[in-house]
Amino acid sequence: MSSWKVGIQLYTLRDETSKDFVGALRRVAAEGFAGVEFAGYGGLEAGKLKELLDELGLRAIGSHVGIARLKEALDEEIAFNKAIGSSYIVCPYLGDEYRKDAETWRSTFRELESIGRKCAEQGIAFGYHNHAFELEEKVDGETALDAMFGAVPADALKVELDACWVYFAGYDPVEYIAKYKGRLPLVHFKDVRRTEDGKPLTVELGTGDVNLPAIAEAATQAGAEWLIYEQDFTQNPPFEAMANSMRWMKENGLA
């Protein structure tokens, strides 16, 4: 039996949430997702958002919060996430200024640890979500991703592994999931194809090159809490892409 539940990263629906945030959450619930990972809160107050989630039977998995916001308003983000019942705050990306060389990376590791310690003190887990560059850039002879999780203790920084980007960077996501077993509560479940010019094209689940069933099985073995569907860019309208991906998960016994 799987250890995880199925959620969605709302960045997938950013065009729809910008027009009707509440309506988008209703569509998510109707498709059968158990939880949502936020990328903004639609301008709702925490109490109103919690009421809506409860009404729809959705769990607040966590929130993606940019590092500048984490440095400037961490207490506010922690309070908001606790109020909506969220368990995780995740740094979703690092700009060039945080990773221009090995020493800058090491400074960023220290910043992430400081943020993670403050989150832990208030009962929220802090995580980091990767793209491909953390596996393409090196720090002291190892991938920046491994250097990060080696430098920052597990009690200050959890792993939110985006399996698609691990695959695209040329690594085996199944091996990476196993590597961080016990530290990896969240797995981004995403499919991708490489275009003729070598660029990534994120596609609906089951239509790309990623071995998604193997990733789901690895997530079970690693004790992951959530598989989180995300599609950075959709070829079909976002709601249609979401529905097609959920249908594939159901047809393959993953939801």
Image (spheres, rainbow, N blue to C red):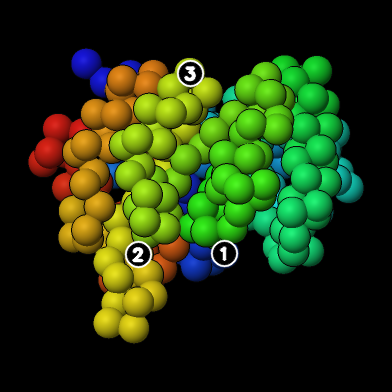
The residue under label 1 is 18
Answer few, some or many: residues within 10 Å of disc 1's Cα (few below 14, many 20 plus, some between 14 and 19). Answer: few
Q: Amino acid at mark 1?
A: Ser
Residue at image location 27% in from the left, 66% down from the top: 193
The residue under label 2 is 202
Q: Amino acid at mark 2?
A: Thr
Query: Quadrant where the C terminus lies?
Result: top left
Q: Helix or strand or loop: what does disc 3 sit on?
A: loop
Query: Quadrant where the N terminus lies?
Result: top left
* Residue 10 visible in this rendered orientation of the protein: yes
Marks 2 and 3 in Cβ contact (< 8 Å): no
Residue at image location 79% in from the left, 25% down from the top: 117
Give residue 94's quadrant in the image.
Answer: bottom right
Counting every numbered tag in the picture gives 3
Q: Position of residue 35 (x, y in %)?
A: 44, 34
Give residue 237's quadrant in the image.
Answer: bottom left
Tag of residue 182: 3
Q: Nearer the viewer, residue 45 or 183?
A: 183
Foreground mark, 2 or 3, reads 3
Residue at image location 67% in from the left, 19% down from the top: 155
Question: Relative to 56, is 38 above or below?
Answer: below
Q: Nearer the viewer, residue 103 or 228?
A: 103
Of label 3 and label 1, which has the lower sequence position? 1
* Residue 144 visible in this rendered orientation of the protein: no
- State how far apart marks 2 and 3 are (Cα): 28 Å
Q: Position of residue 109 (x, y in %)?
A: 75, 41
